[in-house]
Amino acid sequence: MTLEEIIKGRRSIQLYQDKEVDVNLVKDLLEKAKWVPNHKMTQPWRFVLVYDKGKEKIAQLNKRNAAKGATAEEKQKNGEIAYQKMMDVPMFLIVIMEENPNQKLREEDYAATSCLVQNVSLLAWEKGLGMIWKTGALTITPEFREVVGAKLGEKIVGMMQLGYPAKVPKARPRADVQSRITEINN
């Protein structure tokens, strides 16, 4: 596959085969993905890999967060669905970034860390692995931060779900870039 084919072919994957992901493969992807533009070479990132029995704590947190509904049965059902959804993910890659007190550097660091995540996504796709970048309600809870060891002054940039795709969604249309280009040439 060419780089262009990988970029255009990559999809966000939410359904995975029941197949283990090799930890050393993910570590190798991270080793390659680190070559991103990074102003001041702060390299503010670190990673937490969660798999096998380690997923249980994340699944339990997701269960508690999702246990909502009008009745006890509805709450239990929603919680169980959320629990199983996490347990069905072969591996989680938690990307954590040190938050620089200088806002300009913090924004540059976030951009560099986002580039690293994109690199991981493309490198994973090339190897047949799919992923989706998740943020939101679960990842900002104190309980989740504790489970993954996020310290004061660190931002959880994302909880990447990794695995071999069970289903690859169709491409969704992208806006025409030509209509979003302004040229200043005089």
Image (cartoon, rainbow, N blue to C red):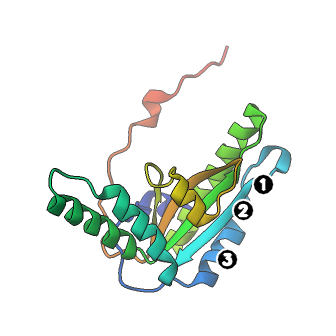
Q: Residue at x 41, y 86 (%)?
A: 19
Query: How would you rate the neighbour count of disc 3 (Cα within 10 Å): few for under 14, some for 14-19, many for 20 or more?
Result: few
State which mark lies toward you, 3 or 1: 1
Compare marks 1 and 2 and give the one earlier in the sequence: 2
Q: Nearer the viewer, residue 99 or 74?
A: 74
Q: Position of residue 13 (x, y in %)?
A: 38, 65
The disc label shown at residue 34, or none: 2
- Tell me if residue 27 can be seen: yes
The residue identified by callout 3 is 28
Q: Are marks 1 and 2 in contact (CB under 8 Å)?
A: yes
Q: Is residue 96 left or right of residue 71?
A: right
First in sequence, mark 2 or 3: give its number. Answer: 3
Question: Three-letter amino acid code at disc 3?
Answer: Asp
The residue drawn where x is 65% and y is 18% is 185
**Residue pointed to by mark 1:** 43
Residue 25 position (above or below residue 71): below
Q: Amino acid at mark 2?
A: Lys
- Residue type indicated by callout 1: Gln
Q: For the residue carrying disc 2, how many other residues have a C-alpha within 10 Å: few (<14), some (14-19), or many (20+)?
A: some
Q: Position of residue 7 (x, y in %)?
A: 50, 58
Q: Name above or below for residue 152 compared with residue 67.
A: above
Find residue 76 and report its horizontal and vertical position in percent: 22, 65
